[in-house]
Amino acid sequence: MKLTSHITRRPNLLPTLETLAQRKHAEEKAKALIEDLSGITVLVAKKFTNERTAEGLQAAFCLTTGCISLGLSQAEIPHNAESELNFLLAQGAEQVFQAGFRHIKALALMPCQTMVTDFDSDPYIQQRNIKALFSELCHAEANRNWMGDEDYRREFEARGENLRIIECAKWLRKNHFSGPVKDKELDANAVISIAVIFAITGDGRIVARTGQKEIENLIRRARESAPDVNENWKKFLSKIPAEHQPSLTVRMDEYRNTLVKKILSKTRIKTIVTDIQNYHAGLEQDVDYD
């Protein structure tokens, strides 16, 4: 039986330092690099941990190691110790650290969910989010597995998808059939769900906000007309900018054999309305009556 091997993934900075130590006549470069790393660590400790304690300085060094490793991993260079060392020496440790930190700041400004609130633009909240991501992704210890760059990549993809959903919802709101919906707060997933549900009848309207009566009327119209849902969705998508169509298509695929079938079935209208209100329309519904 073949045993599974467990390979510890070290922060990118460590192999570069080992490579530097193996180079001949590199004492001056090594000394300068260590001084730079020490200076960065002190600054990180002052801002993020505690420069007055050994624990604070140790934590700051772990964050420095991880942030520089993130900067190296995201650089457009061949990813081996030799190339990353050459890049680190050419750019300087501070510049590579700053590059890694810029990635963290940019990631923190991307939406971690599809709900938009006033808190998202609050400077205090933004700084708190940057600090939390910095601590989460950049803490790297020499004797422990580090996957900060992979975690960064996954989080970047997830937040990028959230951003696409939000931008799609904003476009739908702007083109709402009875006039733009201008609320500052936004439940983007709910907007997309409402638009997809109302598009099944093929009446040409873009619906981004709804109420209980409108949902009831939609269900009745759909049952009376027995619409060609797939054809109506195609017509609906033809009105939508190409960059927003994937977000809508995903929701259509999700609803095709679930919610839409329920709408067109003999399920009680009140039951379906409650289901849509509780699980699909979210905060993007006007309360008509209890």
Image (cartoon, rainbow, N blue to C red):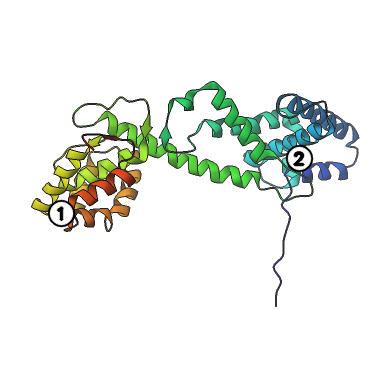
Q: Residue furthest top?
A: 123
Does any portion of residue 280 appear in the rendered image?
no
Query: Which amino acid does the dot numbered 1 rest on?
Result: Asp
Name the image quarter holding the C terminus. top left
Occupied quadrant, residue 16: top right
Image quadrant where residue 67 sits:
top right
Labels 2 and 1 touching (C-beta < 8 A) = no
Residue 48, percent across and down? 71, 28
Q: Residues within 10 Å of mark 1 (few under 14, many from 20)?
A: few
For label 2, the residue is: 85
Whether 270 is drawn above or below 117: the answer is: below
Q: Name the residue tied to disc 1.
A: 228
Distance from label 2 to label 1 (Cα)? 61 Å
- Please state which of the two labelled residues, at mark 2 or mark 1, is closer to the viewer: 1
Residue 228 location (% of width, % of height): 15, 54
Q: Nearer the viewer, residue 52 or 192?
A: 52
Name the outermost residue toward the front: 290
> Quick one: SS at disc 1?
loop
Q: Is there any visible trace of residue 29 in the rendered image?
A: yes
Q: Nearer the viewer, residue 124 or 61?
A: 124
Task: Identify which residue is drawn at 81% across, 35% down.
Answer: 55
Q: Quadrant of residue 22?
A: top right
The residue at the point 23 percent across, 36 percent down is 210
In what quadrant of the picture does the N terminus appear? bottom right
Q: Which of the pair 218/148 is nearer the observer? A: 218
Against 230, is 179 above or below?
A: above
Give the side of residue 142 with respect to residue 48, left or right: right
